[in-house]
Amino acid sequence: MNRLIEQYRRDFPILQGNDVIYFDNAATSQRPVQVMEAMRVFNDTCNANPLRGLYAWSVEATEAYERAREAVADFIGAAHAREIIFTRNTTESMNLVAYSYGLSVCRPGDEIVITVMEHHSNILPWQMVARQTGAKLVYMEPLADGTLTDEEIESKITSKAKIVSVGHVSNVMGVTNPIRKIADAAHAQGAVMVVDGAQSTPHMPVNVRELGADFYAFSGHKMMGPMGIGVLYGREDLLEAMPPFLTGGEMIEYVTRESATYAELPHKFEAGTVNAMGAVGLEAAIKYMKKVGFDLIMSQEELLTKRLMAALKEIPEVTVYGSSDPTRHCGIVTFNIEGCHPHDVSSVLDTEHVDIRAGHHCAQPLMKFMGVGSTARASLYFYNTEEEVDRFAEKVSKVRGWLGYGN
Amino acid sequence: MEIKQLYREIVNEHNLHPSHKRNLDNPTMVLQGINPSCGDDINLQLKVKDGIIEDAAFNGSGCAISQASTDMMIDLIIGQTKEEALKLAGTFMGMIKGETTEEEIEVLDEAAALQDISHMPARVKCAVLGWRTMRQMVEELNRQEVKDADVTAAGSSECGAGPCGVK
């Protein structure tokens, strides 16, 4: 094992002293002690309601929370920290854009363009906007290996498009979509570009301005941060013009019996007491990722994905979906074993201490497009090892036997 | 029972070699049962005469537990009255919720092997799919009978004390 990887792996208490192979990182990743320690320090030294109190702890809590926002802005290349809205997760971020921006701008006959590869959280909010405004939802379809062709992009994004919303990396195929190209096509037609970055942000450097994203959403818990903290980046001029998503405490300037004026960005979109400790944990996760470095994260994931796909290829009954090129999988390997339902596969692997995801992965339209009911998915992170991949493949080769085939 | 053992001893056989996976000629009722989140999908067929389930069969696809559980259920309900079938369904559901004793589940025969599913929350809906669908069908048949009885011979005492009142 790479000595650096071995060293970093020791930072994750849950990965110590057991033989569990955790290959469900696309669902949620594990947290290093550094993240827990940062939250503990917040809790033990300055826990108070941020943005309100006129005393030292509250001031410190506010500073910690806003420092986290600065760290996020820097991490994804936003122009200003006020373009960073803290949410609970990617789903909430997508809903914020749909309710606050989508409902405001869409008119009957307008089009919202997404792909058939999207997670439900990048489908359902747009179905809602389409239903309520009379706009039409248009799907771009990839080739079997997940590629979105230039022709598909250009033919589906027309002058009717108001919003184009695409996942940066598919949570099933693992393929990285050509966001810059799609964003250019969207902007050429006067549409805004929304990016679901839930699966990309943990695995590759992201710069929202280089990507051409007008909105960009991601979750803390998939990148070693805590659950319950997510991010929506939005271009300042767009956020300024949007109505608040939720209303109540913290997001106001002045309230009378009849009306209110709203707070400045970003607090206009952060109604109620915020998840400051979660933000602090996310900041620590970002710091940790920078220490590990995307070079190492990406090279380790590529090494493991190559090894895993090569090993699965040796098992005749296994079908791997998406590109045959491991470098196009972002650590996500979705597969089926002939004759075996993915839930049975996952259940028997669980008894071997192997954790994978099985089902439709919150992407039912994609399952239908791929012509499968459901699939099994192994998703890797940099702290996984070659030894785990080998052990995993060996266990997968036994699944059919456990499920009654050939013995 | 460890799940691999459960598969080995019970589930695999009923999944790979089901006794009742076929189509009935003249079913009294056919109903589709689905678990949208898993893609489990069964098509349950019952032939009922004079209150007795004379024959039953199913088709469909899904995980081994959903298919095997449905096959085992059909073993149990053929030849039973509708009421007995409902009672078995009640016992099975109780077993899956962990609310029954060892003696109570003896009537479930092989299907009692699925009792450990109660410790696997993610698989519960697979195990109960067939039973849930069958219960829905019998309840619907009972409703239809009550309706027919109301129309034809008001005052028939057939359902007087039974569990088949209109909901």
Image (tube, rainbow, N blue to C red):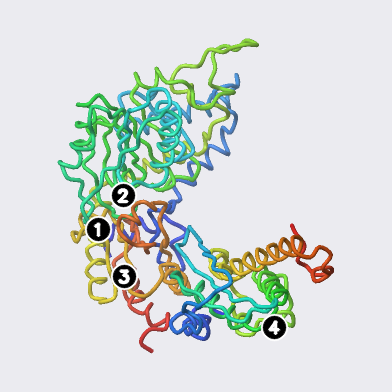
Label 3 is placed on what type of residue?
Answer: Glu
**Contact (Cβ within 8 Å) of mark 2 with mark 1:** yes
**Contact (Cβ within 8 Å) of mark 4 with mark 1:** no
Image x and y of residue A146, in percent? 23, 52
At mark 3, the secondary structure is helix
At mark 2, the secondary structure is loop
How far apart are the two marked residues, 2 and 1, measured between alpha carbons? 10 Å
The crowd level at tag 3 (other Cα within 10 Å; few <14, some 14-19, many 20+) is few
The crowd level at tag 1 (other Cα within 10 Å; few <14, some 14-19, many 20+) is many
Query: Does residue A21 sit above or below A60 in this rendering?
Result: below
Q: Quadrant of residue A163?
A: top left
- The residue identified by callout 4 is B107
- Does label 3 or label 2 sit earlier along the sequence? 2
How far apart are the two marked residues, 4 and 2, measured between alpha carbons? 48 Å
- The residue identified by callout 1 is A322
Q: Are marks 2 and 1 on the same chain?
A: yes
Label 1 is placed on what type of residue?
Answer: Gly
Q: Which mark is residue A332?
A: none
Identify the subunit bearing mark 4: B
**Contact (Cβ within 8 Å) of mark 4 with mark 3:** no
At mark 4, the secondary structure is helix
Residue at 25 percent across and 77 percent down: it is A316
How far apart are the two marked residues, 4 and 3, measured between alpha carbons? 47 Å
Residue at 18 percent across and 36 percent down: it is A154
- The residue identified by callout 3 is A387
- The residue identified by callout 2 is A170
How far apart are the two marked residues, 3 and 2, measured between alpha carbons? 26 Å
Q: Quadrant of residue A230?
A: top left
- Taking depth in this image into account, of B157 and A32 the one nearest to the observer is B157
Q: Nearer the viewer, mark 3 or mark 2?
A: 2
Image x and y of residue B147, in percent? 72, 60
